[in-house]
Image (cartoon, rainbow, N blue to C red):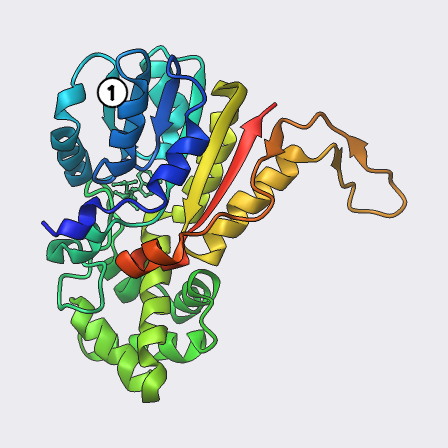
Amino acid sequence: MSNDYHISVLREEAVDALVTTAHGVYVDGTLGGGGHAEAIATRIFPLGTLVGIDADADAIAEARQRLVSFESDRLILVHDNVSNIRTILRQHNIRHIHGFLLDLGVSSFQLNEKSKGFSFRTDDTLDMRMDRRQALDARTVVNTYSEEELTRVFQSYGEEKFSGRFARAVVEYRERKQIETTGELASIIENKAGGRFFVKALARIFQALRIEVNHELENLSRALRDTMEFLVSGSRIVAISYHSLEDRIVKNFFQQEAADKAPSGSKLVPDTLRVPRLRIVTKKPVIPTEEERVNNPRSRSAKMRVAEKI
Ligand SMILES: C[S@@+](CC[C@H](N)C(=O)[O-])C[C@H]1O[C@@H](n2cnc3c(N)ncnc32)[C@H](O)[C@@H]1O
């Protein structure tokens, strides 16, 4: 297991923004190695309760070890998708929460773990599932999606300009042989991308596949939407994202919930008034300090947004 697994991005900033009372119930919806969770637990235990959720069973096991000194009925670790937050909280008879943290994407552990197949830097099975109980994996996507579907995935989730070209290359290759490994896929992309831009193209294509396989954007929207009913007044949502698609979802959700009008969409029909449910705390996203960016390169793309329930 790599050491950088334990470097949590914007750890102090996130926990400072999140914890408003030690007596509260806090949800870490993306537990990972438990770095943020440990910082939250240190501030709230033994008065508060911490619910940690992760779609990856290995992350739960890793976090459980890290949080062993907090083991009690106030520490609840759940192997599930955070998009099921409503069911998860109801199952644990939790009606109100005092803070909700999301530190999105994959952990360095997941990127470095060969069997998970998230990285184009090593030659692994093309998997990319955060949750191994799920049927859809990256191998299925690249071998069964039509050229049009692959183009859409590369375009929408990788924001890749040459999506059509890469989709075509994938389809041509698999007419001869199924694509089994990350190395095989990387060489297909590399051959088509050419020049010095291929690493960026690879990063975009792998990001796109990961988002598709794990339904990352839909799950994020659902998690944000369904958490609202549990948040008490004055409690915070803290969301750290690593690419513009995620950040846009968080930003738009906060703006929508902070607005006192819902646009009608027509000049002829007046906007409808609505009661805002959130107050935006970070007008601009918080980004890591230069020192953090140097010490933890993974933090470089991080953007943290905070909103408070009214
Ligand atoms: C960046 S890591 C979190 C690291 C953690 N904050 C720490 O300090 O160690 C993201 C984690 O969230 C999990 N994850 C991402 N999206 C998820 C979702 N929709 N539901 C549950 N877990 C998710 C991933 O499996 C991964 O373990």
Q: In which quarter of the image is residue 88?
A: top left
In the image, residue 17 sits, relative to residue 203, either above or below, namely above
Instruction: Please provide percent x and percent y for residue 144.
Output: 29, 63
Residue in the picture at 37% in, 54% down = 211
Q: Residue furthest front?
A: 291
> In the rendered image, which residue does mark 1 sit on?
76
Which of 86/279 is in front? 279
Ligand 1 positioned in quadrant: top left
Instruction: Answer with left or right where residue 239 lies relative to residue 176.
Output: right
Instruction: Answer with left or right where residue 200 lies relative to residue 120.
Output: right
Q: Which residue lies furthest to the right in this view?
A: 268
In the image, residue 225 sits, relative to residue 230, either above or below, namely below
Is residue 10 among the parts visible in the rendering? yes
Is residue 194 among the parts visible in the rendering? no
Q: In which quarter of the image is residue 95?
A: top left
Instruction: Answer with left or right where residue 294 lies relative to residue 61.
Output: right
Instruction: Please provide percent x and percent y for residue 184.
Output: 18, 74
| Quadrant housing the C terminus | top right
Tag 1 secondary structure: strand
Q: How many marks?
A: 1
Instruction: Please provide percent x and percent y for residue 45.
Output: 27, 16
In the image, residue 5 sits, relative to residue 207, either above or below, namely above
Q: Which residue lies furthest to the bottom in this view?
A: 195
Crowd band around label 1 with a 10 angstrom C-alpha radius: few (<14), some (14–19), many (20+): some
Instruction: Please provide percent x and percent y for residue 83.
Output: 39, 34
Query: As shown in the figure, which amino acid type bears the numbered disc 1?
Result: Ile
Q: Quadrant of residue 148?
A: bottom left
Residue in the picture at 18% in, 59% down = 117
